[in-house]
């Protein structure tokens, strides 16, 4: 009931273009922001470190990929490789003694440059062929990382992150690492929202929707596709660096394997292409649901509710997880964000059922 | 605390390690059940916290943190990516991580890796045991030895050791990589055949192994000349064909079969009592017995720790317990291990066994080999870990 | 020289073994317009099905035929319960659905029947066929022949009236409906047929590597084949398979020794990149028709 | 009993957007009826309701009945409706671009029909549209707009319909082709007794050939009657037929009086 | 009348093939400044192809095209757009994922400097630019009476309005030449009248040169000064509208029996 458009009047163009024109949305964002800021004070280390932290970082990764897949319409099935480039280059840069703030930018840039190479190669192709091209790139990057010990960190292929500080705060404690991740995902989200309402975002969407029409009204498709790859790879690279320094703290090739790319794509798609909410929901779903299911099924089994063989027991979460993905898509083919949106719309037109009658 | 000692057996049951983790984990749990059935140690019982990590580091991290919160003081991940992602956490949190027969070789250096216990022969030691067998049976000098391995850090692990040995023992050594997952290796073996090796070491795991054996036989390499890393088991023999695989040898760290006192007691007090953790048919298989042996060592460590430090156990006390293990051979199930603060591998002993068409038959005695070369690698790896690499 | 010939021959046969997996993918794409990322998992399920029937004592041929019938039925069920509701939805979401299906099946098969690899010995001996100094892999030879037969059958199938209807469906679901083609049935049939090819793939691959979840990873070489040949081309499956197989065998055969690592995946990746740079729709793939 | 009858149909898109409300119309056996209306009035929606193609567009019938002969159409899926004898030529042609024209025709022929019948129908389509025969082996996606429209109609005829619904068949066609197509539609109607429901913006051409027409505005049917009656209606003349005399486009007013039926 | 005008767009001997189909055969035409020029012909005669050649989408394989004396054939489409030619499409080519407003704002693209950093620092950087362009866009929305659908998603508004949005998008680019490919297809009489009005208004207000493809002969004869008639890719007639379309060749190929010919 407070969720109403009624009484919201815009008298200036700025207001009409505000990020959250509906007051209720603004409140919601504020409450979530406060909850996120206060998280270290009410969450145990287990939940902060094993749930919140990775969720935020993967959300940033999903947002970076959403920019490319959702907004610019370029399917990318090798995004983990982009993040890997960020992670590895950040560690090597930090080891060179470069301040961590610059290291992050540097890692982003390295990813962006190599990521744009992916893009440049992929410019001629669309759809599934682009999927395959990016997948091929993933294999190439993996191969280089694994086969060049100078990158991967010797025979064990493990690189530990050196101790660093961000803005004079040492990135040691979980809280410090959490806040850096939170800051990054917040920045990513704000950036994403701003892109959506500026000419840059429009140009990307234009190319996604009708590249020939975009070209004829003056958009250089080549340039904007490259910019999309560059920007999203930059975000992916920084996210990779933050993943390395704030979460894993020792990187190995498997952390950025092909499966991770698929998971990222799943985050973007299950979330629902092209929205910030979708990025968060999708990342949460893909990252946390398997974990929760594993614990849930194990809990059931421990309390004797599930008398099945241990083999089936361990595969049950996988089956439920797959079934959940299918179920959600059947229920709402446009993803979790659309479900959220439907609920929101319902309240917006409440108590009416239809927008026009 | 509440009188139970918790072990986190957080393994991969659904992805890369499915070929082993089922039986292995079953052995581990059955052994702990056996200990509990027999009254525990000093009145303390054992509890296994079992979770699937799907071989994914982030799931491993969550499972680790959760199990730690539940009080687990020993962890076994049986997954290279997950173990690697957690090495630092384990060292920092001062809890024990065991990496039997699979972990990084340099973790044998107990001073650099105080909380990590390979506690059985690492891949480096496995390679030397196999080489020693070849030296004892026909000699090495002037021979051609091929290593056919999966293209991953695990597959490449024995290369430096074998290269050193080749120099020492004057044999010709060559490594051939096949791409993972290894279900298709024909091009690699065409190359191997042209090398005309006297012996081939196959270094893979899971589905790649039977394919390797098949390809070897197809390319005219007699099964007797094929030797495998520890990962070659009954299922693989069935897969290749029990008769076809007759003659193939492998490294083993733990005896196979059920005629060991521990296995007999498990059969009697756990399986027959209906307390088994899985299919009774798996009892006594290679991987099952490795699982049993790992827990036997861990429980022995707990016994030592309780004896000298008293309950309740912590990770630190358990570590101290491990380092007191001396000449422990799990009633003959495995070679005697002696773990010290310096040597967490426990000697690196093992033996070679041969598939006789029905079962694995030992063809050498328990023992370690060329540990000087292994030590050199350990020192090298540990030094670079200390540097922070 | 013999070495080269051996690499070419075995590479070609391996490639055809991949074609066997790829064929199901193309069948579905060509008639339903969906890139089915669950095809690998379907091959795995088919492998389990054959294993289960064969291990229960049925003769191999019977086991294969029954498994084919079962997989065809499963294909129809997939359409009925999963895809029907997705008609007209964005294609990428349908792709995601197939990914969900893949995850489900990967839990389902090993979860029910045990994760340890099953052996499926279909009686193809290990002894190679030796021609000069060239050793030809007997199992792959059988696989290659089966692949060629199935590819031929598919070519004929798409010439029939039913085949034409299926191709129409992949072109436009809504206008297919509008002229009375049952899009649902067409999609069901295509999934069913893909299930049948999966039985061939699952049996043959299962016999060389054992039946376990790793059969599902065959999807990736298969997709490489498909991209190279063109996603909707049966001829592409044949030619793409041969190319991926031969190049992926010959080049590593000479290069691996030099760089000291397995280069096959890199070679395949490079082939794919180069091909789609030159021919964005694969060798035989159809171009998008864009009218302005 | 009319061939097709809609009574009080209401359609909602995307669960929230009400597109047509309370639409009722009838098409008699062998009748030729036009449905006229402005852009977005709900003409295509009405046709899709009849042919059962709302689903993929997230539309749903929330009220009303549609019957075809004896049968109630709403529970049937689109292909079953085609089998029962109605066919919809979609707006924007939507032929199968990757198939040849010939294959387009084959694809539309009912499953299980005899090869002889197929050839007979195919020859009849080629007789109506000789141009298609010339181009029967090239990719349909590259045909010109007029040829695609012919193919779309020809393809619909392959289903042996009792009622054919055409959504803006003249869209984008040259004046000559519009005449041709309308002539063929009339021929199909008179020679084969196929009922026709025609949606058309080109009202003057449509009212020349149909027997009666409905006028739809904003999702409501606002007027119906025989072609003759409608042609005489001043509003229809002004808004659909371009007034009584010739329009002088340089003089058209920006703001016109509102249509009377909306008042 | 035509001779008096200074030529703005000149096509010289333009040809285009599609895999063996000779879609345009040596077409030459010259369009004068401020003129409304019609392009008609049977379906598949190459009208759209000619327009595509002008706007750079299918560059001619032979011949050349000059705009305001500068050669534009061979330039990339977005360069041609920047040089002052805007167009609409036969099959509406709006960006379906955007609102009407965003679609029209897209028309301002060539005047904007989009980059990710500007988006990041929206409040300090991009906002001013957005709002400045917004004013311009609102003028066009006003002119074309699109206020009521401004915030709708383009794919739910009726086709007629979509065509109008496309026109608005083109006008926002402040072109000197406007190319319209069948702007009135699928419209009823009333809507056609509106559209004509908008085109005439825009042309007057902005001094545009207009090239229009249309199959509605009443419209063509009413607003076009001259027309070019194509058939099978070649010119069959050119001249003042009424004369050109009463040419017997044109009647035979295109108009058909008397009804529309007047
Ligand atoms: N898929 C859809 N989702 C939401 N609204 C829709 C959808 N399709 C159509 N509409 C809306 O429903 C109304 C009726 O549309 P319909 O296509 O039936 O009109 P029409 O009379 O055929 O117009 P046109 O002359 O443009 O073809 C329009 O306002 C349109 O915006
Ligand atoms: N991309 C293309 N590939 C192949 N052929 C094409 C292509 N575009 C156009 N053609 C062919 O070129 C010829 C001219 O087409 P064009 O679209 O210019 O016709 P048009 O005069 O605009 O017709 P209409 O009035 O139907 O729009 C046609 O024969 C068409 O099939
Ligand atoms: Mg319509
Ligand atoms: Mg045209």
Image: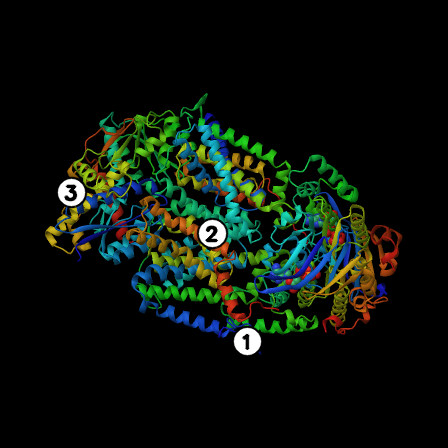
| Mark 2 residue crowding within 10 angstroms, few (<14) / some (14–19) / many (20+) | many
| Mark 3 residue crowding within 10 angstroms, few (<14) / some (14–19) / many (20+) | many
Q: Position of residue E180 (x, y in %)?
A: 73, 61
Marks 1 and 3 close (CB-CB < 8 Å): no
> Disc 2 sits on a residue from what chain?
A
What residue is disc 3 on? B338
**Residue A38 shows in the view:** yes
> What secondary structure is found at the residue carrying circle 2?
helix
What residue is disc 1 on? A6
Rendered position, A108 above or below C231: below
Marks 1 and 2 close (CB-CB < 8 Å): no
The way the protein has been coloured in the rendering is: rainbow
Q: Position of residue B239 (x, y in %)?
A: 36, 32
- B376 or C11, nearer to the observer: C11
Marks 2 and 3 close (CB-CB < 8 Å): no
Q: Position of residue C119 (x, y in %)?
A: 37, 33
Name the front one of labels 2 and 3: 2
Rendered position, A47 above or below A142: below
- Quadrant where the image shows the C terminus of chain D: bottom right
Residue A326, disc: 2
């Amino acid at each position: 009931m407070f969720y109403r458009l009624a009484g919201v009047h815009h008298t200036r163009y700025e207001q009409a273009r505000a990020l959250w024109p509906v007051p209720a949305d603004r409140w919601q964002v504020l409450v979530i922001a406060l909850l996120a800021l206060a998280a270290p004070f009410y969450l145990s280390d287990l939940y902060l470190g094993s749930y919140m932290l990775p969720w935020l970082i993967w959300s940033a990764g999903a947002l970076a990929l959403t920019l490319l897949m959702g907004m610019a319409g370029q399917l990318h099935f090798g995004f983990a490789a982009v993040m890997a480039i960020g992670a590895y280059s950040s560690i090597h840069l930090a080891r060179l003694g470069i301040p961590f703030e610059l290291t992050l930018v540097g890692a982003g840039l390295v990813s962006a440059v190599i990521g744009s190479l992916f893009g440049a190669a992929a410019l001629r192709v669309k759809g599934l062929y682009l999927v395959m091209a990016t997948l091929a790139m993933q294999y190439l990057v993996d191969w280089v990382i694994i086969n060049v010990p100078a990158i991967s960190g010797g025979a064990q292929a493990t690189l530990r992150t050196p101790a660093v500080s961000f803005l004079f705060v040492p990135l040691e404690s979980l809280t410090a690492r959490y806040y850096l991740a939170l800051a990054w995902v917040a920045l990513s989200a704000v950036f994403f929202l701003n892109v959506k309402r500026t000419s840059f975002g429009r140009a990307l969407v234009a190319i996604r929707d009708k590249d020939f029409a975009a070209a004829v009204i003056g958009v250089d498709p080549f340039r904007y596709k490259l910019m999309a790859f560059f920007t999203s790879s930059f975000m992916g690279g920084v996210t990779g660096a933050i993943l390395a320094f704030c979460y894993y703290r020792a990187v190995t090739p498997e952390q950025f394997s092909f499966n991770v790319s698929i998971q990222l794509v799943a985050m973007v798609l299950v979330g629902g292409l092209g929205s910030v909410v979708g990025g968060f929901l999708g990342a949460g779903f893909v990252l946390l649901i398997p974990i929760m299911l594993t614990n849930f099924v194990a809990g059931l089994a421990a309390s004797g509710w599930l008398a099945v063989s241990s083999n089936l027991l361990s595969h049950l979460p996988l089956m439920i997880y797959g079934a959940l993905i299918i179920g959600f898509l059947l229920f709402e083919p446009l993803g979790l964000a659309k479900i959220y949106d439907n609920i929101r719309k319902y309240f917006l037109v409440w108590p009416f059922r239809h927008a026009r009658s | 605390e509440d009188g139970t000692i918790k072990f986190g057996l957080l393994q991969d049951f659904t992805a890369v390690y499915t070929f082993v983790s089922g039986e292995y984990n079953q052995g581990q749990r059955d052994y702990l059940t056996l200990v509990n059935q027999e009254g525990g140690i000093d009145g303390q019982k054992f509890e296994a916290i079992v979770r699937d990590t799907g071989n994914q580091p982030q799931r491993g991290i969550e499972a680790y943190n959760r199990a730690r919160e539940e009080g687990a003081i020993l962890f076994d991940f049986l997954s290279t990516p997950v173990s690697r992602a957690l090495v630092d956490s384990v060292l920092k949190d001062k809890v024990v991580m065991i990496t039997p027969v699979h972990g990084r070789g340099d973790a044998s250096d107990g001073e650099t890796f105080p909380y990590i216990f390979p506690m059985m022969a690492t891949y480096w030691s496995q390679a030397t045991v196999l080489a020693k067998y070849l030296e004892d049976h026909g000699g090495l000098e002037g021979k051609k030895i091929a290593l056919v391995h999966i293209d991953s850090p695990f597959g490449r692990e024995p290369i430096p050791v074998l290269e050193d040995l080749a120099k020492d023992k004057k044999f010709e050594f060559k490594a051939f990589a096949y791409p993972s997952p290894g279900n298709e290796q024909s091009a690699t073996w065409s190359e191997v055949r042209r090398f005309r090796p006297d012996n081939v070491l196959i270094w893979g795991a899971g589905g790649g192994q039977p394919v390797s054996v098949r390809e070897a036989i197809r390319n005219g390499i007699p099964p007797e000349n094929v030797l495998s890393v520890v990962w070659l088991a009954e299922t693989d023999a069935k897969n290749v064909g029990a008769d076809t695989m007759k003659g193939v040898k492998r490294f083993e760290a733990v005896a196979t079969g059920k005629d060991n006192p521990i296995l007999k007691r498990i059969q009697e007090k756990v399986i027959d009592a209906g307390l088994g953790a899985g299919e009774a048919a798996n009892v006594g298989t290679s991987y099952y017995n490795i699982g049993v042996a790992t827990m036997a060592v861990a429980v022995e460590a707990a016994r030592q720790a309780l004896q000298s430090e008293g309950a309740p156990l912590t990770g630190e006390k358990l570590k101290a317990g491990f380092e007191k293990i001396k000449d422990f051979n799990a009633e003959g199930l495995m070679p005697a291990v002696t773990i010290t603060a310096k040597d967490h591998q426990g000697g690196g002993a093992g033996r070679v066994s041969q598939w006789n068409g029905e079962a694995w038959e030992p063809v050498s005695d328990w023992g370690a080999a060329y540990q000087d070369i292994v030590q050199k690698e350990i020192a090298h790896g540990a030094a670079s870990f200390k540097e922070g690499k | 020289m013999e070495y080269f010939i051996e690499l070419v021959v075995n590479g070609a046969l391996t490639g055809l073994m991949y074609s066997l997996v790829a064929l199901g993918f193309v069948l579905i794409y060509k008639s339903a317009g969906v890139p089915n990322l669950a095809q690998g998992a379907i091959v795995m399920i088919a492998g389990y099905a054959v294993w289960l029937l064969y291990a229960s004592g049925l003769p191999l041929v019977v086991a294969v035929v029954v498994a084919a019938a079962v997989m065809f039925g499963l294909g129809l069920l997939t359409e009925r319960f999963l895809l029907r509701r997705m008609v007209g939805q964005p294609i990428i979401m349908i792709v995601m659905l197939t990914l969900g299906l893949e995850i489900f099946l990967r839990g389902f098969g090993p979860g029910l029947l045990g994760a340890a690899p099953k052996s499926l010995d279909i009686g193809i001996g290990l002894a190679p066929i030796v021609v000069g100094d060239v050793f030809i892999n007997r199992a792959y030879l059988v696989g290659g022949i089966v692949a060629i037969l199935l590819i031929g059958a598919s070519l004929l199938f798409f010439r029939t009236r039913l085949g034409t209807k299926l191709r129409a469906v992949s072109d436009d679901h809504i206008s297919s409906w509008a002229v009375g083609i049952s899009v649902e049935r067409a999609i069901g049939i295509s999934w069913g047929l893909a299930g049948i090819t999966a039985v061939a793939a699952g049996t043959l691959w299962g016999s060389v590597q054992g039946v376990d979840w790793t059969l599902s990873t065959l999807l990736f070489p298969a997709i490489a084949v498909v991209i190279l040949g063109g996603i909707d081309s049966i001829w592409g499956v044949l030619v793409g398979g041969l190319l991926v197989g031969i190049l992926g065998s010959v080049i590593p055969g000479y290069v691996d020794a030099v760089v000291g690592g397995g280069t096959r995946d890199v070679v395949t990746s490079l082939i794919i990149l180069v091909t789609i740079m030159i021919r964005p729709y694969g060798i035989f793939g159809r171009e998008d028709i864009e009218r302005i | 009993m009319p061939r097709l009858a809609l009574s009080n149909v209401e359609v909602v898109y995307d669960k929230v957007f009400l597109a047509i409300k309370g639409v009722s119309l009838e098409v008699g056996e062998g009748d030729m009826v036009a449905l006229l209306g402005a852009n977005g009035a709900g003409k295509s929606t009405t046709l899709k309701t009849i042919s059962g193609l709302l689903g993929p567009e997230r539309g749903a019938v929330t009220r009303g009945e549609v019957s075809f002969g004896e049968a109630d159409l709403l529970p049937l899926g689109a292909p079953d409706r085609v089998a029962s004898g109605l066919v919809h030529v979609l707006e924007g042609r939507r032929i199968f671009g990757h198939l040849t024209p010939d294959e387009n025709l084959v694809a539309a022929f009912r499953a299980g029909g005899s090869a002889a019948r197929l050839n007979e129908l195919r020859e009849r389509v080629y007789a109506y549209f000789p141009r298609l025969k010339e181009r029967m082996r090239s990719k349909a996606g590259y045909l010109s707009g007029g040829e695609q429209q012919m193919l779309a109609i020809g393809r619909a005829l392959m289903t042996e319909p009792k009622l054919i619904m055409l959504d803006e068949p003249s869209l984008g066609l040259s004046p000559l082709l519009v005449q041709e197509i309308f002539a063929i539609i009339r021929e199909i109607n008179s020679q084969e007794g196929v009922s026709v429901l025609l949606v058309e913006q080109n009202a003057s051409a449509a009212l020349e050939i149909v027997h009666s027409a409905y006028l739809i505005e904003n999702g409501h049917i606002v007027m119906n009657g025989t072609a003759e009656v409608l042609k005489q209606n001043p509003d229809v003349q002004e808004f659909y037929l371009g007034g009584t005399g010739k329009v002088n486009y340089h003089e058209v007013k920006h703001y016109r009086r509102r249509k009377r039926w909306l008042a | 009348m035509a001779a008096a005008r200074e030529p703005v767009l000149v096509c010289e001997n333009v040809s285009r093939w599609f895999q063996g189909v000779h879609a345009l055969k040596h077409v030459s035409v010259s369009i004068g400044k401020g003129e409304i020029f019609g392009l008609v012909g049977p379906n598949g005669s190459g009208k759209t192809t000619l327009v595509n050649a002008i706007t750079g989408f299918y560059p001619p394989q032979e011949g050349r095209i000059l705009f305001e004396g500068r050669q534009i054939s061979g330039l990339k489409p977005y360069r041609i757009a920047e040089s002052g030619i805007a167009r609409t499409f036969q099959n509406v080519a709006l960006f379906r994922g955007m609102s009407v407003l965003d679609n029209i704002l897209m028309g301002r693209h060539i005047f904007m400097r989009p980059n990710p950093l500007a988006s990041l620092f929206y409040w300090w950087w991009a906002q001013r630019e957005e709002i400045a362009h917004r004013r311009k866009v609102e003028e066009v929305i006003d002119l074309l009476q699109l206020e009521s659908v401004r915030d709708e998603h383009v794919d739910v508004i009726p086709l007629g309005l979509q065509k109008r949005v496309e026109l608005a998008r083109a006008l926002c680019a402040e072109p000197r030449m406007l190319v319209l490919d069948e702007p009135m297809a699928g419209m009823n009489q009333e809507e056609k009248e509106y559209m004509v009005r908008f085109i005439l208004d825009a042309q007057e207000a902005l001094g545009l040169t207009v090239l229009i493809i249309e199959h509605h002969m009443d419209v063509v004869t009413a607003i076009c000064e001259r027309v070019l008639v194509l058939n099978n890719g070649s010119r069959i007639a050119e001249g003042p509208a009424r004369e050109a379309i009463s040419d017997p060749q044109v009647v035979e190929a295109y108009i058909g029996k008397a009804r529309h010919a007047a």
